[in-house]
Image: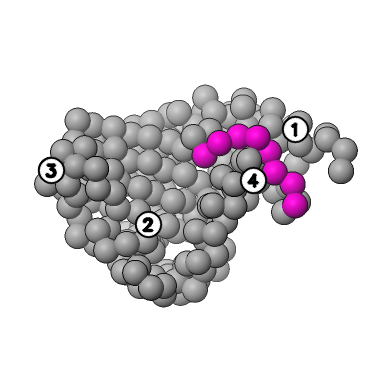
Amino acid sequence: MRPIRIALALLPGIVGGAACARAQSPAPAAAPAAGDSALPQDRYGTLSQNDIAIRLRTDELEVRFVPLDARVTSLLARDAAQSLQRTVARNRAAIDSAGRAAGISEPGLALVTFFGLKPGVRFSPELLTVTARNQFLRPLAMVPLGSRFGAGQLNAQESAMAVYLFEDLLPVWDPFSVNYENLVSNEWERRLPTLYRERDRLSAAPR
């Protein structure tokens, strides 16, 4: 297994730390009929971030996973899409540096947030993985977006966030599962029909 990488975010108020490896899951569904590329940058959809966010929850901790993939972020309404785009842009130098250190030039990205629901909750960022196409995908690097991420502990109402880097683009047009410790979410498969419809609607709309 490849070693965990820790990256320093190169922005004021952002502290570095990161991890790595590989993961993946159940057999994929049929690919969508339309193209697999992102929409033009000047076009946006009507979906919210909740439409592409996957959540796992215990009594103490909630984990939120959002693919930072232009093929699906371009389906969001303008404000939601631009918010995610700004997150990537602000941290681009740190993401690129972490990718080079991990030996990946075009990583798949996801925004992962841990929310504390009780005081003194411990969390282990490296335990979050993705299962797709019968493969187990672990992040090869992480770029923390705040000091709490490296601490590994949260109080109630606190959160810790990082951009996770995977070796390849996430298979956003196929079913995949998100895993953390003994929690598994297959919610992405149920999101796909909504994503397909929005993508096809926007692709067919006149410019």
How busy is the neighbourhood of tag 4: few (under 14 within 10 Å), some, or many (20 plus)?
Answer: some
Query: Can you identify the residue that label 3 sits on?
Result: 119
Q: Amino acid at mark 4?
A: Arg
Side (left or right) of 94 relative to 192: left
Disc 2 and disc 3: Cα gap in Å?
A: 21 Å
Q: Residue at x 16, y 38 (%)?
A: 118
Q: Is residue 139 visible?
A: yes
Which sits in the foreground, 109 or 89? 89
Q: Mark 3 near mark 4, Cβ–Cβ under 8 Å?
A: no
User: Which quadrant is home to the N terminus?
Assistant: bottom left
Which numbered disc, 4 or 2, marks the residue that appears first in the sequence? Answer: 4
User: Which quadrant is home to the C terminus?
Assistant: top right
Query: Can you identify the residue that label 1 sits on?
Result: 200
Q: Amino acid at mark 1?
A: Asp
Q: Secondary structure at mark 2?
A: strand
Query: Can you identify the residue that label 4 sits on?
Result: 78
Q: Is residue 121 visible?
A: no
Query: Can you identify the residue that label 2 sits on?
Result: 162
Residue numbers of the magenta segment: 42-49
Q: Amino acid at mark 3?
A: Pro
